[in-house]
Image (spheres, rainbow, N blue to C red):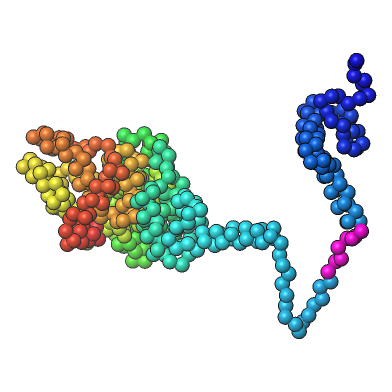
């Protein structure tokens, strides 16, 4: 006999209450109906084992009881908090959510204070780039020597983040810090440019077109006009240091052939009292020497303005390399002598081979010493090496040249005429050079290292 449509299907148990029956008879999707069937089957099996009401029935009974209790109790009374000025103050108990939110706010504020007030830059929540950014924007907080020590170590261990062209958004500012260059107003640099050609202008023009002429990166970014302006402004600065403008004679009034007074051109008066280039006393710096153009090139390449490159070049040659720009270049010659002595310590075989070929550092290493290796391409490697030199001292450039010779050791020893090979060094590998310099520092005697430090002064 066919099953009547009004009777339940044989695979489903009768519903526990009419509400559930209405729920099951309503149109549902297949998935919803399958879920209800599974729940009903589970409830039927459980009730059949122990004659207990189904799970669905128990849930509905619990909801009805809760609703009845809430209706009988009513809403909770609002507590009245009265102020007690004479009694002890009582703090209300905070909820867990409030405590978490307050702790989160304090944690964020604490990290900000830690980033601003850190002394050695040891913040695990920030990478080195973010720490440098905070240091440059906010300045050192408290321990300035500690911040400088951390910055130098970070430059050595981590290096500056730069692209393939060697450009870094932080490099020029870190150089300003490491060289301790003073701030400079742009108007001061513009005033030097507006003074016109300096006494060394002709020599400057003879050198600028040769500045890193074979480096496409430099030529693409820096124009010859920028080099001329910077070197001419530097020449005026060095000139004024030797011959202050206050000592220059003021424009005087003379009588012309017709008897009428005429003013003397102050520029011509100044030129009459300006010594020729090369006539400076041996202890005084020259206002321009060949090689200054190459020293200024990396600054112009990395800086964001000519004024930044100018103040860095000026501070480098006047404070950190004063002996290199004297008329006799005493610092460069002393550096070459130190190079020969250091090479004899770290690699006696190469030193003996070069000596047998009558090759001293004066012959093959003079440009590299004078320009801090800036004459050796590629330029991004020069920038990396300068990061290290500015962090730990430009006197280490002598060791950097020794490191380059050490890298050419096999080629030097394999030829009987190494002079031709040493006319141009192979491409610079700054990381390798820095590693070798650090190893050389541990080998050379202390008194020799002290001479190395003093030779640039």
* Residue 178: x %, y % from top left: 37, 57
Above or below for 427 versus 311: above
Q: From where the camera sits, is residue 335 visible? A: yes
Q: From where the camera sits, is residue 226 visible? A: no
- Specify the quadrant of the image occupied by residue 33: top right
The quadrant in which the N terminus is found is top right
- Specify the quadrant of the image occupied by residue 328: bottom left
Magenta stretch, main secondary structure class: loop
Above or below for 432 versus 440: above
Residue 75 lies within the magenta run: yes
The quadrant in which the C terminus is found is bottom left
Residue name at image x 65 percent, y 58 percent: 100
Residue name at image x 51 percent, y 59 percent: 115
* Residue 71: x %, y % from top left: 91, 56
Relative depth, front residue between 62 and 442 = 62
Q: From the viewer's perspective, is 347 left or right of 180?
A: left
Relative depth, front residue between 397 and 96 = 96
Residue 288 lies within the magenta run: no
Magenta residues (range)? 72-79
Outermost bottom residue: 86
Residue name at image x 66 percent, y 61 percent: 99
Relative depth, front residue between 366 and 122 = 122
Residue name at image x 40 percent, y 47 percent: 160
- Specify the quadrant of the image occupied by residue 430: top left
Q: From the viewer's perspective, is 173 left or right of 23?
A: left
């Amino acid at each position: 006999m066919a099953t009547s449509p009004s009777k339940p299907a044989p695979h489903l148990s009768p519903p526990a209450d009419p509400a559930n029956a209405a729920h099951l008879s309503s149109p549902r999707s297949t998935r919803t109906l399958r879920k209800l069937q599974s729940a009903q089957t589970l409830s039927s099996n459980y009730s059949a084992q122990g004659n207990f009401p189904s799970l669905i029935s128990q849930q509905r009974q619990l909801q009805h009881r809760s609703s009845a209790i809430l209706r009988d109790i009513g809403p909770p009374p609002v507590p009245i908090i009265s102020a007690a000025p004479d009694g002890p103050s009582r703090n209300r108990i905070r909820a867990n959510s409030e405590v978490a939110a307050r702790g989160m706010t304090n944690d964020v504020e604490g990290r900000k204070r830690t980033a601003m007030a850190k002394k050695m830059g040891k913040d695990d929540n920030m990478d080195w780039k973010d720490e440098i950014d905070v240091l440059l924007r906010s300045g050192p907080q408290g321990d300035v020597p500690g911040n400088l020590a951390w910055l130098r170590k970070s430059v050595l261990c981590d290096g500056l983040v730069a692209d393939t062209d060697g450009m870094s958004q932080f490099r020029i500012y870190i150089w300003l810090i490491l060289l301790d260059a003073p701030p400079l107003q742009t108007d001061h640099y513009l005033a030097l440019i507006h003074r016109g050609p300096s006494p060394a202008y002709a020599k400057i023009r003879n050198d600028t077109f040769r500045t890193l002429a074979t480096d496409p990166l430099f030529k693409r970014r820096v124009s010859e006009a920028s080099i001329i302006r910077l070197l001419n402004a530097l020449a005026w600065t060095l000139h004024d240091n030797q011959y202050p403008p206050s000592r220059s004679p003021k424009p005087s009034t003379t009588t012309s052939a017709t008897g009428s007074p005429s003013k003397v051109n102050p520029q011509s008066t100044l030129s009459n009292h300006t010594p020729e280039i090369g006539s400076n006393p041996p202890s005084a710096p020259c206002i321009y020497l060949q090689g200054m153009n190459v020293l200024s090139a990396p600054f112009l390449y990395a800086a964001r303005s000519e004024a930044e490159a100018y103040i860095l070049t000026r501070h480098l040659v006047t404070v950190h390399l004063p002996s290199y720009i004297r008329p006799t270049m005493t610092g460069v010659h002393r550096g070459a002598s130190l190079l020969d002595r250091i090479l004899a310590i770290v690699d006696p075989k190469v030193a003996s081979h070069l000596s047998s070929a009558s090759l001293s550092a004066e012959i093959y290493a003079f440009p590299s010493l004078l320009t801090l290796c800036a004459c050796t391409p590629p330029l991004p490697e020069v920038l990396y090496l300068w990061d290290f030199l500015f962090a730990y001292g430009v006197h280490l450039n002598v060791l950097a040249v020794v490191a380059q010779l050490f890298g050419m050791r096999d080629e030097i020893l394999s030829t009987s005429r190494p002079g031709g090979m040493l006319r141009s060094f192979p491409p610079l590998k700054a990381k390798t050079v820095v590693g070798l310099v650090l190893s050389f520092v541990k080998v050379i005697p202390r008194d020799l290292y002290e001479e190395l430090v003093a030779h640039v002064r």
